[in-house]
Amino acid sequence: MPHKIGIPKALIYYKFAPMWKTFFEELGLEVIISPETTKKIRELAISSAPDEDCYTTKLYFGHTMYLKNKVDFLFIPRFGSKHKTNIGCPKFIGLADVLRSMYSDLPEIIMPHFNIAKGRDNKVTFFIKACLVGLRFTKNPVKIIQAFRKAMIAYKQYKKQLIVDIETLSKWEQSEIMVNDFPILKKDEKPLKIALVGHSYVINDSYCSLDIRNKLRELGVDIITSEQMPRELIEEQLTKHEANLYFDFEREILGTILYFIENKVIDGIIHLMIFGCGPDSLAGEVASRFSRRNPVVPLLQLVIDDLTAETGMKTRIEAFTDMLRRRNSSFAFQLPALRIT
Amino acid sequence: MPFSYPHFGSLNYIFEVIFREIGRNDLIIPNKPSKKTIQLGARYSPEFVCTPFKMTLGTFIESLNRGATELGMGGGNGYCRFRYYWFVQKLILEDLGYDCKFVTFDYEDPLQLLRTFKNAGKGVNYLQTFRAFRYAWVKNRLTDKVDELLYKYRAIESEKGVSEKFAEKLYRDIVEIKGFRNCRKFLRNLPEIFKQEIDVIRDADPLKIAINGEVYVVLEPALNLDINKRLNELGVITKATVTLRKFLDIGQRLNPFYKMEHEKAIKYSHKYVPYNIGGETRENLGDVILYKKKGWDGVIHLYPFTCMPEIITRSIFPQVSRDYNMPVLSLVLDEHTGEAGYQTRLEAFVDLLERRRDIMREKKRLT
Ligand code: SF4
Ligand code: SF4
């Protein structure tokens, strides 16, 4: 019987899943990933997580609790940063420690620490740390090295598939292609072009994001998400400002918004924010300030927390798309950034 | 261009020292913030940003209205929001119609810090800047000591308000002292001066509580509703365990034979959080153990609403507190914190500690 290792499907799972999954599978473990967020997981989350944590971190607790009795090990890396100056979110580093402190009945947690910006890690230590994790499950070094290689390849491929290049982006902007599911259109309706911006673990978690992707599809919206945006563009956009936004995963969010505010080729931007989120509170403000200074592409900021109701969200999105359609037919109508909690 | 900076508890005096030393005679020294200040800041702040943002923004607006045009603030790349504050505040202030320039200090990197100070100064070279800097950290040791003694004597003084007035005078003296030798002498004499100046209640039997948490909340009385004073008035000796000297005091940082208090605390916290996660998490967790060993009675942990590192600290505290049998009270603070409720919680905690102490003494007597 192979050991079972559980990976909660929340937070940076959505960034690194292919890498982790391949690695453990190649080592001969059975990888058990918690299912998509459900009402039950949300309830688990709310009862098990610290009150004041952000909604997504709470969901992480919910997923962990779901896996608790189903696995022999849990994989909860203490992820600090993968960039030479920029970091993730402090909460990612503390997850494993908080969980282990609050719940002594959890299975053994595999929690390697990795931090380039502040922890003197680099590619070599990354490899060594992966090997150390591997050694816990097999004594065969060849197997570990192979698992590592395959994991890296899987990760690269995943990123390549996910992120579009500049050429593809400009084709999308010209409405020549689509980069996500086809929108459902009524007769004589042209699709609206909207950028859906937010943390990967929000926009890809349909329960957490209140199924916004499908809603937009039904409203005839053709979307591109912030995680699909070409990195060069985002970096270029952010270097225009004197301050370095050192939250690595927030960069794609702010970069995307600023890019489309300046670029003016699409109809609107929807920014999903998480209540109480540190990086969002600042980057969201920067976004809304720039949007008000240059109000051509409307920006809708929706703040989500564990109490947000689906119906309320739906009306707001509908109102926003309606407004965009009306605006398309009668131009010269301006709307400032709108933030709704 | 008149220069200003955020108000930061008694560190305010230290900032004054350093900027005067580097030739800035055009300082607008920030006023002590009040409830109004934070409400003013909150009005223009992002809704769920952490509280220090609102307080510093409010202070900036007040200083700008008094004529400041250049503002000093932390910068660089950090773990949490603080070092990105300035950029957002700048945008907000611009939108409000203020014309201002930010000077940002990356306080983690001593060389960079020195360079920024030199450039911010007027007609000073590196040597002079270094000297100014050294003044700052040496005098910071003095203000920290005065704080410590004030929080002790205010709890046991026989005539109310004497220690506070006395400390106020000492802070001013510290700003004015010339020469490192005099600073050192002053530091040595401080405990003695307090002893001579202030009459204490003879048979006082004070509890001792360590106050820690997010650095700004712990050090800025306007934000923590002057927690030290409140506890002192309940007859409790307190001590703020966090200090900016962990960045500023390069003398002690580089001294291989000297272990700063926070370094000891970090060591103790190793089994709970072995890696830095920003903020003061590790120090705060370690403090519980450190102060237990020193024989203190309890710890109060303060943190701003939505603070990222301190929510982690707070979640791990129960375990540390259990493991070492040391009571910890975590309090979250923001601009809506009501005084009455706050006072009640402090009083309840002090009661609890008192009862605990009685029980423990009783036990000791019996064995
Ligand atoms: S980035 Fe924001 S939403 Fe994500 S874990 Fe950190 S605080 Fe929570
Ligand atoms: S330590 Fe907490 S309060 Fe301070 S800036 Fe960071 S998140 Fe905000």
Image (tube, rainbow, N blue to C red):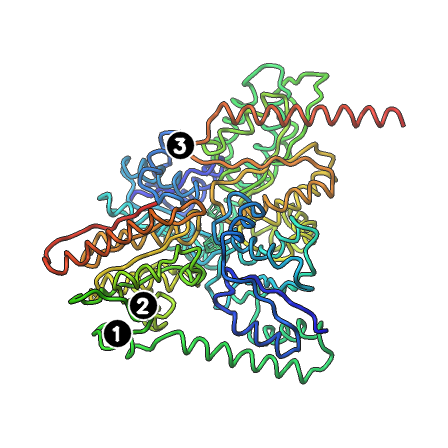
Q: Quadrant of residue A212?
A: bottom left
Label 1 close to label 2 by CB (< 8 Å):
yes
Q: Considering depth in this image, is A299 or A321 the residue closer to the camera?
A: A321
Single out the mark in the foreground, 2 or 3.
2
The residue beneath circle 2 is A224
Q: Compute the Cα span from label 1 to label 3.
A: 52 Å
Q: Chain of mark 2?
A: A
Does label 2 lie on the same chain as label 1? Answer: yes
- Which quadrant does the C terminus of chain B fall into? top right
Amino acid type for the residue under numbered disc 3: Pro
Amino acid type for the residue under numbered disc 1: Trp
Q: Is residue A92 above or below residue A126?
A: above
Q: Is mark 3 within 8 Å of ligand 2?
A: no
**Percent position of residue A225, x then y:** 34, 66
The residue beneath circle 3 is B33
Amino acid type for the residue under numbered disc 2: Ile
Q: Quadrant of residue A118?
A: bottom right
- Which quadrant does the N terminus of chain B fall into? top left
Q: Chain of mark 1?
A: A
The residue beneath circle 1 is A172
**Percent position of residue B79, x then y:** 49, 55
